Image (cartoon, grey):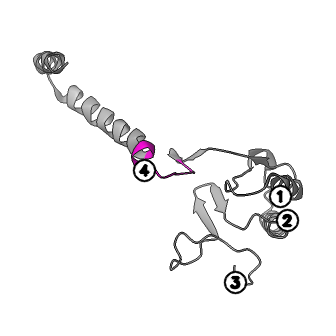
Amino acid sequence: MREHRISGLKIAPESPTLSYLFFAYDTLIFCRASKEEAGKVKQLLEIYGEASGQRINTEKSFVLFSKKTEESSIEEILNVLGGMKQVRQSKYLVLPMIIGRSKKHVFKYIREKVNSRINGWKEKLLSQAGKEVLLKAYQTML
């Protein structure tokens, strides 16, 4: 980033540029969809491999392109990265990697998951009689 070899990603015009994120054993690298920057990323991964003694498993590595990226560019970039596959829609840490305009739809899953957990906890804390009362209340609501 400092040497301007990869462009990174800006979330908003005034935000700092984001070039990577680390999560436990995963790394997300953000760059422009070009053969040149793909080559720099590949070079970066090779340098990391030599320095650490760890080899990047390209079969477990994926590339996510913006929907504006041309198909011909995608093929060229994947060739440069050698063995990596394109992913069209994916989840990372349970959240979708692509979030469109409808935030309610995307995050509805999280709300439902939290509600089911809370309901599960409530049921575990109730006695048998309490569970029967709760069941009657649910049936009346339906």
Q: Could you tell me if the residues under marks 2 and 3 are in contact, i.e. CB atoms within 8 Å?
A: no
- Circle 3 residue: 2
Q: Amino acid at mark 4?
A: Lys
> Which stretch appears magenta?
96-106
**CA–CA distance between discs 1 and 2?**
8 Å
Q: Amino acid at mark 3?
A: Arg
Please tell me whether residue 58 is drawn above or below residue 10 in the rendered image. Answer: above
Between 17 and 120, the one nearer to me in the picture: 17
**CA–CA distance between discs 2 and 3?**
20 Å
Please tell me whether residue 78 is drawn above or below residue 115 in the rendered image. Answer: below
Q: Give percent across and percent down for residue 16.
A: 55, 78
- Circle 1 residue: 73
> On the image, which quarter does residue 8 sit in?
bottom right
| Nearer-N-terminus badge (4/1) | 1
Q: Secondary structure at mark 4?
A: helix
Please tell me whether residue 137 is drawn above or below residue 54 in the rendered image. Answer: above
Q: Could you tell me if the residues under marks 1 and 2 are in contact, i.e. CB atoms within 8 Å?
A: yes
Q: Residues within 10 Å of mark 2 (few under 14, many from 20)?
A: some
Q: Give percent across and percent down for residue 134.
A: 14, 21
Whether 46 is among the magenta residues is no
Q: Residues within 10 Å of mark 1 (few under 14, many from 20)?
A: some
